[in-house]
Structures are given as structure tokens and as C-alpha cells.
Image (cartoon, rainbow, N blue to C red):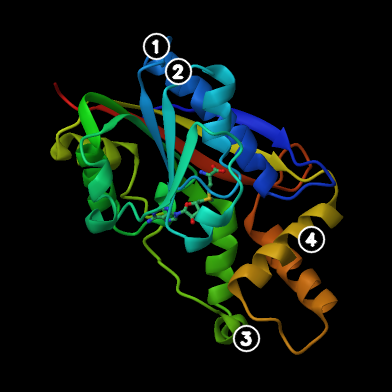
Amino acid sequence: MSGFKVKVMTMSTDKNSLQLLCRYSEDFVKLCAQEFQWKDLSKDVIMDIGCGNEFRCCKFILGEFPDVSALVAIDNVPKICLVPKPSRKIHVYQADIVKRETLEQFQGKMDKAVSANTFHLITEKKMAFENVYHLLKPAGEAAFLLYLDSELDSLKKALLEIPKFKALHKGTHDPEKYSKEHDEQYYQRMLEEIGFHNVRYKKEQAVICYPLNENCKDHLLELYLTFFKKPSENVDEIKEEVFNIYEEIVDPHEGKLCYRMMLLKLFGVKPT
Ligand SMILES: C[S@@+](CC[C@H](N)C(=O)[O-])C[C@H]1O[C@@H](n2cnc3c(N)ncnc32)[C@H](O)[C@@H]1O
């Protein structure tokens, strides 16, 4: 079994979980630069896949490498093209990494591709990785930050086992999302089968502590309302109920309630 680093963070009381994506993306960009020994990017076009409306990876790349030739930011939500761009070097497109027909204009044109906090959301991962391979120039580099597991997903699973909550579930649930078989070696093999060379990875467990139980309750309720309809009873009652279920399934970290996520940072190179 391969080892992993553990990074403990405390969520600030005034911020929500999305703020943490910022920390992950920043660390990820720094690691990409280190792994691939990025120095002069003045001739490089880099694609950010699943850029999100904050363009976090693009901004961090620009911060570290202001000379980068261009950034191509893609996301599959149509509104992405309406979001004001933080820099003229960022070119934004609506495209779906699973759908080759939306990516035609980029085939073989990217020097590098990065994707943070996105690939675990994609069910057809092999197709998505294959499409990244096709987007790259020969010797092009690809880096992905995805999650192998999350205790927040364990809460969702626990709620789905309770008939009252199952009836309120909205959207779909993929029970394979964090399947135990889909570990770091599984993804390494997948990239190698596609043709990537020099495939390697780093695993990191993020332990995110809540400063106060009240922050945990608020966050769990926010999460609950993302996946489940508002119940007819008082929302405060649901908040307590969800919190009690959570306390049962998650071990605190040094006495503080928290959640753990296993992050996988995966790197590969298209052969020349
Ligand atoms: C959790 S957000 C991460 C945003 C950003 N990368 C970050 O780290 O802050 C995931 C993003 O991936 C996008 N996304 C999900 N599936 C996608 C797909 N198949 N193709 C392109 N973008 C996708 C979502 O719309 C969303 O903006």
C-alpha cells in the first residue's frame, strides 16, 4: 500500500467549504510546477479543465508564471462564458471534457492541461482522460487533482439508507463515485493504457476541522440542501438530525469534528 501525506486544516468560521478548493488548487499548481519543472512558460498554452467561475487554477498559474503564453479555460456549464475574465490571457469556452465533438478546435494544440477538483465528478473518466490525451501536443503534460474518497459522501450514503431522506433525494447518486477499487493504481493504469508516459501520483489526506460544532451543523445543512429537498418539518430539526447521524459515522480529529478527503494528484506526459 502506498503512503500519503496528511494535511490538517481548519475551516474558518466565516467561510464555506468552497473556499478550501482555493487552497487545494494553489497547492496543486505549485506541485505541477515542481513535478514538471516549469520555468519559462512564455511559449506554452495551458488548458484548465473544469475551470469553474473563479478560474482559480488559471489565476494561480498567472500569479506564478505571468509570462505564460495563454490559458484556455473550459467548463461544461453554459454560463461560464458570461463570467468576467480576470485576465486577457484567459480564453474561456464552454466545452465538455467527455464530449470529443465540443473539443475539436483544441485537438493537438495544448502544451499542458491541468484539472483541479473536477475529475471525481465525471462518471466517464476514461473517455475524459482520452480526450485530454488528444488535446495535447506531443510531449504535452497533464495533471489532475481528483478525490478518491470523502467522508461527506459517506454522510450522503448514510442518509440515503434512511427511507425518509431517500424520498427527499434530488438528482442522481453514483454509488461507484468513490469505489474502493478505483484507487491510485487503477487511475495510473488507466492513463498508461491510454498512452501517457511517466505516469506518477501523489496522495494526500486532507483533514478539514470545524472550529465549532455550529459550523459543522451549518455546513452539513448546506450539503444536505444540495442533495435533498427541503423537508416539511422545521429545518432546525433536520439540521440536528443530520448532525447526529454525522457524529455517529465520523471520528473527530483531536476532539474536533472534521471531515476527511483523500486527494489524488496524477501526472502524465504524452509521448513525443
Ligand atoms: C468543484 S468545481 C472546481 C472548479 C475549479 N477547478 C476549482 O478547483 O476551483 C468543478 C467544475 O468542473 C466543471 N465540470 C464538471 N464536469 C465537467 C465536464 N464534463 N467538462 C467540463 N467541466 C466540467 C463544473 O461545472 C465545475 O465548474
* Rendering coords of residue 59 (x, y %): 58, 31
Disc 2: which residue: 33
Residue neighbourhood size for the residue with mark 3, other residues' Cα within 10 Å, grouped as few (<14), some (14–19), many (≥20): few
Q: Position of residue 247 (x, y in %)?
A: 72, 59
Q: Tell whether 136 sits left or right of 8.
A: left
Q: Residues within 10 Å of mark 2 (few under 14, many from 20)?
A: some
Q: Secondary structure at mark 2?
A: helix
Q: Quadrant where the N terminus lies? A: top left
Question: Could you classify mark 1 by the number of other residues whose Cα lies within 10 Å: few (under 14), some (14-19), or many (20 or more)?
Answer: few
Q: Which class describes the residues within 10 Å of circle 4: few (<14), some (14-19), or many (20+)? A: many
Instruction: Kindly identify the amino acid type of the residue bearing the numbered disc 1.
Output: Gln
What kind of residue is marked 2?
Ala
Marks 3, 2: nearer the viewer: 2
Q: What residue is shown with label 3?
A: 164
**Which one is nearer the viewer's eye here, 202 or 4?**
202
Callout 3, which amino acid?
Lys
What is the CA distance from the residue labelled 1 to the residue labelled 2? Answer: 5 Å
Task: Give the residue at mark 4.
Answer: 217
The one nearer the camera, 128 or 149, is 128
Q: Amino acid at mark 4?
A: Lys
